[in-house]
Image (cartoon, grey):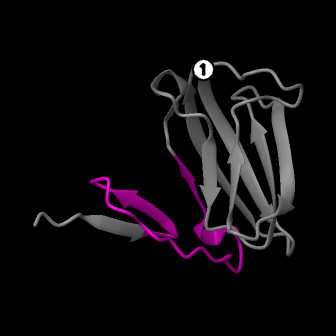
Amino acid sequence: MKKSLMAVVLGACFLTSAAPCICLAATAANVSSAIAYPNPCDARKGQKGVTFDNLPAWVRIRIYTKGGELARDISGDTSNGALVWDLTNSGGSPVATGVYLYVLTDNSGYKLIGKVAVIQ
């Protein structure tokens, strides 16, 4: 019987086979250990959004273009420790291919800045 390889990384499951996976998600204390994936996010391969994982119970995600323009502002409760950006701007239109900066802010004011690449 072939064994399935599974790794649990910060609350996200990645499987190397079709074996079932049970992930127990929990919210983090702050945004310091948050991750964004997939990165790069390639919509041509069917990837529909960027998941921000290992988040605290409440978070604000601001996504900026490389020119510094606010593309999207997402905030809310994250009872499962994750939020997904659907690759659209504030007007609901798909964003262009490029590199985007994100700023995660928790309710205590702690901030985490990172970048994510989007391929449309």
Reading the image, the residue beneath label 1 is 97
**Residue 15 in magenta stretch:** yes
Q: Who's the residue at 74% across and 25% down the image?
A: 67
The quarter of the image holding the C terminus is: top right
- Please provide percent x and percent y for residue 9: 43, 67
> Does residue 57 sit above or below 66 in this rendering?
below
**Residue 5 as seen in the image, left or right of residue 37:** left
Coordinates of residue 21 in the picture (x, y in percent): 41, 66
Q: Main secondary structure of the magenta part?
A: loop
Q: Residue shown at 82%/37% (left/top)?
A: 72
Q: Residue at x 64, y 77 (%)?
A: 26
101 relative position to 72: left or right: left
SS for tag 1? Answer: loop
Question: Residue at image x 86%, y 59%?
Answer: 76
Q: Which residues are magenta?
A: 9-37
Pointer 1 local density, CA inside 10 Å: few below 14, some 14–19, many at least 20: some
Q: Which of these two is toward me, 118 or 67?
A: 118
